[in-house]
Amino acid sequence: MRPPKKDGQATVVYFHVTVMGLDSIDETSM
């Protein structure tokens, strides 16, 4: 992975990965 930059896109990608991870955990719980 590339080091984080002072850019909004990096935050969006991290947020997207977090949401996908939570979604996967939610699916596993159900």
Image (cartoon, rainbow, N blue to C red):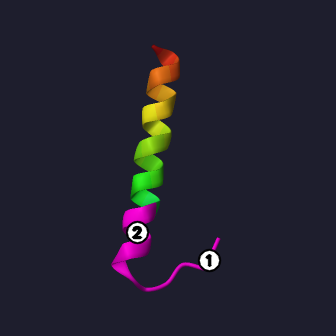
| Furthest residue toward top | 30
Q: Residues within 10 Å of mark 1 (few under 14, many from 20)?
A: few
Picture layout, residue 16 above or below residue 24: below
Residue at 40% across, 69% down: 11
Q: Give how far across and how far down residue 4 sits, in percent.
A: 54, 78
Residue at 43 percent of width and 86 percent of height: 6
Whether 22 is drawn above or below 1: the answer is above
Q: Secondary structure at mark 1?
A: loop
Tag 1: residue type? Arg
Image location (x, y in percent) of residue 18: 46, 49
Q: Please state the extent of the stretch shown in magenta in the rendering.
A: 1-13
Quadrant including the N terminus:
bottom right
> Which type of secondary structure does the marked residue at label 2 adopt?
helix
Residue 20 is inside the magenta segment: no
Question: In the picture, which quadrant includes the C terminus?
Answer: top left
Q: Circles 2 and 1: CB distance less than 8 Å?
A: no
Q: Quadrant of residue 10?
A: bottom left
Q: CA distance from mark 2 to mark 1?
A: 13 Å
Residue holding disc 1: 2
In the rendered structure, find residue 11 and report the number of the disc placed on it: 2
Q: Earlier in the sequence, mark 2 or mark 1?
A: 1
6 part of magenta stretch: yes
> What number is the disc on residue 29?
none
Number of marks in the rendered image: 2
Q: Residue furthest bottom?
A: 6
Q: What's the amino acid at mark 2?
A: Thr
- Residue at image point 61% right, 79% down: 3
Where residue 19 appears, x then y in whole percent? Answer: 40, 45
